[in-house]
Each structure stands twice: as C-alpha cells, then as structure tokens.
Amino acid sequence: MSLIPFNFDPDIEGIDRYLQEDDDDPAVNYEGRLNNSNWCSCGYCKGMLSDIDCLCCNELPNLEKIREEEGKCITLHRSFSKLILDKEILNITRHNLILKTKNRINKKKLGQHHPENKTWRFICYKQYTSWVNSWFAMGKGNRVVLPACVVQKIREEYPEPNGIYVGFKNSKKLPA
C-alpha cells in the first residue's frame, strides 16, 4: 500500500466555477449618482460623499445568495442586526482583530475599554464584508465598496459626534 499525496484534499474546481459565475456580471457604472437616488432600488440608500459610495445592495450579485426576498434591502435581513450591529458579536470580532493585528496603534484603538464609534463602525464594516464575501479572498489591500444602505445603517447605530464621515478609499497597499 502506498501513500498518495493530497489524496484527501478537497477539490477546488467547484469553488472556481462558483467564483467565475460572478465574474460575468458587468461592472456598476457609478457616474452621475451623487445628486440623485435613481440608482437605489431597495429604498434605503441615502446620499453619500462621492459617486463610488452610491451603490445599492440590489446591485451586488453576491447578495442574491443571502437576500431573503428579491429587491428587499439587505439591512432588513434577519441576520443583519445580529451579525453586523450587535455589540456582543462585534466584541468577539474585535477580540479576533486584536489578536491578528500587528500594528500597535490599531491594537491600542481596538483594545480600548470603551472604543469610539469610529472603531465600532470599522468593526461593523469588517464584519459585513466577511459575511457577504465569505467565498472570496479578502485581506490586506483588498477593499470593496459597501452599499449605501449598509453604511447608513451602521452610521445610525454608531454615529460620529461631529457628523463628518470618510467615504470609500482605495487601498494604498497591493492586494495580498
């Protein structure tokens, strides 16, 4: 009897096919969205800081697998408030981020006894991205635009005292 290396490793072909299905969708055209809400089909998106931030959850094909009802806003999903906004769940995510991060400044911000709302929003964004992109490689340098309705809901839950927010920023680092 001989050993066959990698004999019990899972076959990656099925996942490759799954990922290729979403690659066929055309890219979203963000131009001219800033001063109107015609692009929103869920009814919960509000004005954002830039055209690229004006994205509706119904425009994202990967949400079709999660969404409970066609055209319904992802923020109304039964798991959204539990997974994305609940402080007990966010504290678990925060603890994991503290363990993973190597940057001392970020570790200190995450480890504060009473984190600022800015920190909670960051954790919510990470949690949401992980939830809806669980089949895709996400990591350092890989950033995605979040739907305006999601960003708005998180900002309502964890508001900035001065009301000034930063929109989507492309990564300065190369994807991992």
Image: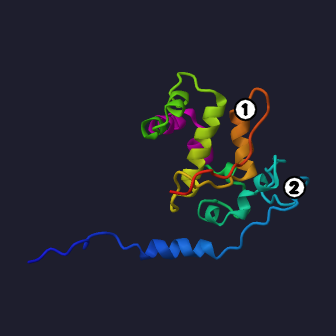
Q: What distance separates the C-alpha of mark 1 from that of mark 2?
A: 22 Å
Q: Secondary structure at mark 2?
A: loop
Report the residue marked by disc 1: 159
Camera-side residue of 80 and 21 = 21
Q: Identify which amino acid the numbered label 2 is placed on.
A: Ser
Q: Secondary structure at mark 1?
A: loop
Magenta residue span: 79-96
- What is the magenta segment's predominant secondary structure? helix
Tell me where residue 60 appears, x and y as whole percent: 68, 63
In the image, residue 130 sits, relative to residue 81, either above or below, namely: below
Camera-side residue of 21 and 71 = 21
Could you tell whether 129 is left or right of 27 in the image?
left
Categorize mark 2 by other alpha carbons within 10 Å: few (<14), some (14-19), many (20+): some
Tell me where residue 16 appears, x and y as whole percent: 48, 74
User: Is residue 51 covered in magenta?
Assistant: no
Of pointers 1 and 2, the one earlier in the residue sequence = 2
**Residue drawn where x is 52% and y is 38% of the image:** 89
Query: Looking at the figure, which quarter contains the N terminus?
Result: bottom left
Residue 91 got which mark? none
Could you tell whether 15 is left or right of 169 in the image?
left
Camera-side residue of 174 and 58 = 174
